[in-house]
Each structure stands twice: as C-alpha cells, then as structure tokens.
Amino acid sequence: MPKGYWVSVYRTISDPGKLAAYNKLAGPAVKAGGGRTFVRGGRVEAYDAGIAERTILIEFDSFEQAVAARESAAYQEALAVLGDGVERDFRIVEGID
C-alpha cells in the first residue's frame, strides 16, 4: 500500500505567534494520526516557484491515514488557531508503492 504525505510550502508567515500556537497543537495531532515529520523548515534552494519561506514533509502509512489525520478534530483545532497567520500551499499526495 502506498504511503501518504503531507506537503506544505509556506509562501509567507505574517503572524509568527499564530504559527507558534499552531505548532503546539499540530505536532501532537500529527503524531496521534500516525504522521512522521521528515522536513520542517531548514535550508531551502527554491528554483522554480521561488517560495522558500518554510517547507514541511510528513509521512503517513497510507494516503487514507494522511487524509484522516488532516480531518481529525485535533488538527482542525490547530488550523483554527493558525487562521490567517500564514499563506501556504498544503496538499496530501500518495506515494509510489
């Protein structure tokens, strides 16, 4: 069964306080949903889109597990705290078997 991945690329962080509050809630929500964070910030070389603020990569055992974690009450609470504190491109993708 292919794994599922959350891929999130931040264009802007307009409210670092909201992001910090989100991180406090999102980390435990992701872990409870079975996610393993592989990339969180760090060095970036952005060649095509020029978006280099922050990149997150989280792996789940399946695409369905990744979707369920995103839809969980705990993660929805984290999103409510984040609000308009960032502009990002967030997607869930299926890995290759």
Image: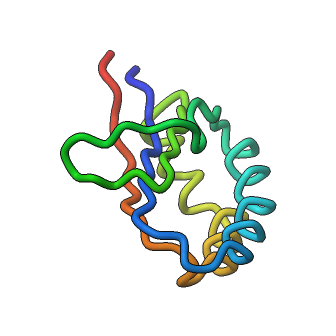
Question: Which residue is found at the position 58% from the left and 30% from the top?
Answer: 38
**Coloring applied to the structure:** rainbow
For this orientation, the residue located farthest to the top is 97
Q: Is residue 37 above or below residue 32?
A: above
Q: Position of residue 44 (x, y in %)?
A: 44, 38
Q: Is residue 49 left or right of residue 31?
A: left
| Front position in the image: 90 or 97 | 90
The C terminus - image quarter: top left
For this orientation, the residue located farthest to the left is 48
| Front position in the image: 74 or 56 | 56
Asked which quadrant contains residue 73, the reply is: bottom right
The N terminus - image quarter: top left
Q: Is residue 60 left or right of residue 37?
A: left
For this orientation, the residue located farthest to the bottom is 84
Q: Position of residue 74 (x, y in %)?
A: 72, 64
Q: Is residue 77 left or right of residue 79?
A: right
Asked which quadrant contains residue 33, the reply is: top right
Question: Which residue is found at the position 44% from the left and 72% from the top?
Answer: 87
Q: Position of residue 47 (x, y in %)?
A: 23, 40
Question: Which residue is found at the position 56% from the left and 35% from the top?
Answer: 39
Q: How many marks?
A: 0
Question: Which residue is found at the position 44% from the left and 35% from the top?
Answer: 4
